[in-house]
Amino acid sequence: MPMSPNKRKLPAYTDYTYDMFMTSAGKDHAEITQFNQWREQVIAADMYTFQIPHLGAQRPNVSVQRVSGEELDLISFANYNYLGYSNHPEVLAAAKQALDMYGLGATGSPVLNGTFRIHELLEEKIIEFFGMPGYGVSLFSSGYGANLGVVSSFVHKGDYVVLDRLSHASLVDGAVLSQAKIKLFKHNDVDHLDRVLSRLDYKNSRILICTEGVYSADGDTGHVRDIVRVAKKYGAAVLDDEAHSLLIAGENGRGVAEEQGVLEEVDMIIATFSKSFGGVGGCLFAREPLTNYVNWYARSRMFSCALDPAVTGGLIKALELAAGPDGKTKRERIQSNADYMRSKLQGHVDIGSSHSWIIPVIYGDEHISIPMSDYLQREGLDTSLMAFPAVPKNQSRIRLFVTSEHTREQLDKGAEGIIKAAEHFGFLLKDKKT
């Protein structure tokens, strides 16, 4: 029988959303105590599936160790090693070579003493990959830091940042840090964006519009081309965060901006190295005068250590592979795998409007998130859950990250496990109709 919360009372610790312990509960820091009490309750119930250590590389097959010490072998749909470059032998060899030459860490800020020749080589490779002369690259040690630093250095107090309502936290935090005025438009609603911009002092103010190539909660594609069109009408700049789409979308893997024919019309492209590249870090790709400026005035770059050299060496090799026949093959395979997975889930569970390699399975009620995460692990699946406030209330979901490296057998088992969980927890589409 389905374990629907309407049919069976769930334990108190399932009444949890991420925002519950985020605000001050008084001078005695009660929210810290309350959070740790909640955490211990979930651990005592042997349902704690967060921050559990993986025992090897992020492959489609992974091994994890739960808090109890129990080890599980799982099919992973929770990591975004989209093209398998994180553990690719040529990428690892390049990283090891860079490690031997440059050492473990950069041990310095990029502007001061932390830039190595290998960082410049990565910048050159990125410019070559995009094929756009006159452009430059600003490297950051995280994708979060890239958005934080770029937004907060480009706009300032008195300017405007216009965000999609589903913008990533790093864009929101960059906007807050900038002290610019923040405006929101409905997700992917270009008509609403037009109305928002029309109410601003656009003739005398700097405006930055932020969009994304693929949105990580819904797996849907940003309307980059239409946003660029509206931005031109009001003299606004456009930042396109291609974190989940670079190396995959577009004929040459240059992202959704390439796919929609506006690569040279977007003012700033953000790349994240922890997804398709398989490493860590991020960068801004923009016209060189802007990247020169951001290098100095992005606080998350100036006051952080530079990318570690070994990762940088691996990123160069990953980009070389992605730009060649290997990348073309992997792009075709990841899209084929994603389409296949959707076909297995369609009609059984709500998968939203995704056409990408991120497939949401929307189950709604956040109360079942913890027991379902435990259930899925015990069914042999490693998944990524999202609940309020990362998504709207009653829109909680499983995120499935499909990669080029998944086999059809793994996809079949994944779909079977998800449908079985939907039946158990009462969110099969047929259950909702009756």
Image (cartoon, rainbow, N blue to C red):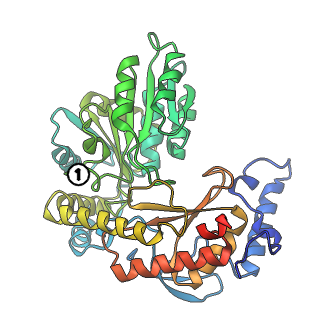
Q: Between 418 and 382, which is closer to the camera in this rendering?
A: 418
Query: Is 396 situated left or right of 225 in this image?
Result: right
Left/right placement of residue 367 relative to residue 219 reads right
Between 244 and 268, the residue placed more toward the observer is: 244
Q: Amino acid at mark 1?
A: Leu
In the image: residue 92, left or right of residue 406 = left
Counting the numbered discs, the total is 1
Q: Nearer the viewer, residue 262 or 69?
A: 262
Q: Is residue 409 left or right of residue 169?
A: left
Could you tell me residue 430's position as x and y percent?
61, 69
Is 6 rendered above or below residue 70? above
User: Where, quadrant-wise, is the C terminus in this rendering?
Assistant: bottom right
Seen at 66% across and 54% down, the residue is 388
**Mark 1 residue element:** helix
Where does the image place residue 211, in percent across and percent down from the top left? 43, 38
Q: Position of residue 100 (x, y in %)?
A: 24, 69
Residue visible at 65% across and 86% down in the picture: 68
For this orientation, the residue located farthest to the front is: 434
Q: Residue furthest top?
A: 204
Please tell me whether residue 230 is drawn above or below residue 271 in the rendered image: above
Q: Mark 1 — residue?
A: 122
What residue is drawn where x is 45% and y is 31%?
Answer: 190
